[in-house]
């Protein structure tokens, strides 16, 4: 398995305006309650205060690169509640896709 990204759960009552790129990472989506809300259009729904931001890379990334991304978001003032590393094995995503 190879590390390719991270889901970062951000503590905020609205859909966060996060950097679209950082290092090898690209912001692929933001979801809330399992439903994609970024990129638009987002469905009309009640939001929870901890949306998930998915950052992925086409290349293999290191733990240190994930740490740098999280540290960058913290430095921008975002509070996060948890992170989940995203792995790819034999070309197959080992993580789920949002609705």
Image: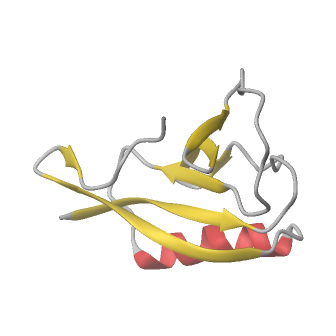
What percent of the width, then of the height, locates residue 40?
71, 24
Position of 12 with respect to 38 (left or right) is: right
Residue 95 seen in the current view = yes
- Name which quarter of the figure residue 30 lies in: top right
Residue at horizontal 81%, vertical 46%? 15
Please name whichever residue, 33 or 71, is drawn nearer the observer in this view of the structure: 33
Q: Residue furthest top?
A: 41
When asked about the image quadrant of residue 52, the answer is bottom right
Is residue 28 among the parts visible in the rendering? no
In which image quadrant can residue 1 be found?
bottom left
In the rendered view, would you say 4 is above or below 21? below
The residue lying at 54 percent from left, 52 percent from top is 55
The colour mode here is: secondary structure
Instruction: Look at the picture and state if 85 lies above or below 18.
Output: below
Q: Given the current orientation, which residue lies at the most extreme left position? A: 90
Q: Is residue 51 left or right of residue 99?
A: right
Query: Does 75 sit left or right of 40 as displayed?
Result: right
Extreme residue toward the front, this view: 46
- Locate residue 4, reporting x and y percent: 36, 57
**Residue 11 at x, y = what percent?**
79, 68
Q: Residue at x 60, y 65 (%)?
A: 8
């Amino acid at each position: 398995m190879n590390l390719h990204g991270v889901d970062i759960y951000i503590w905020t009552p609205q859909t966060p305006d996060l950097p679209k790129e950082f290092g090898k990472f690209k912001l692929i989506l933001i979801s809330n309650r399992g439903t994609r809300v970024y990129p638009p259009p987002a469905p009309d729904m009640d939001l929870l205060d901890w949306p998930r931001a998915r950052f992925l890379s086409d290349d293999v990334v290191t733990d240190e690169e994930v740490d740098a991304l999280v540290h960058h978001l913290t430095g921008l003032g975002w509070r996060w509640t948890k992170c989940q590393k995203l792995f790819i094995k034999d070309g197959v995503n080992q993580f789920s896709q949002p609705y």
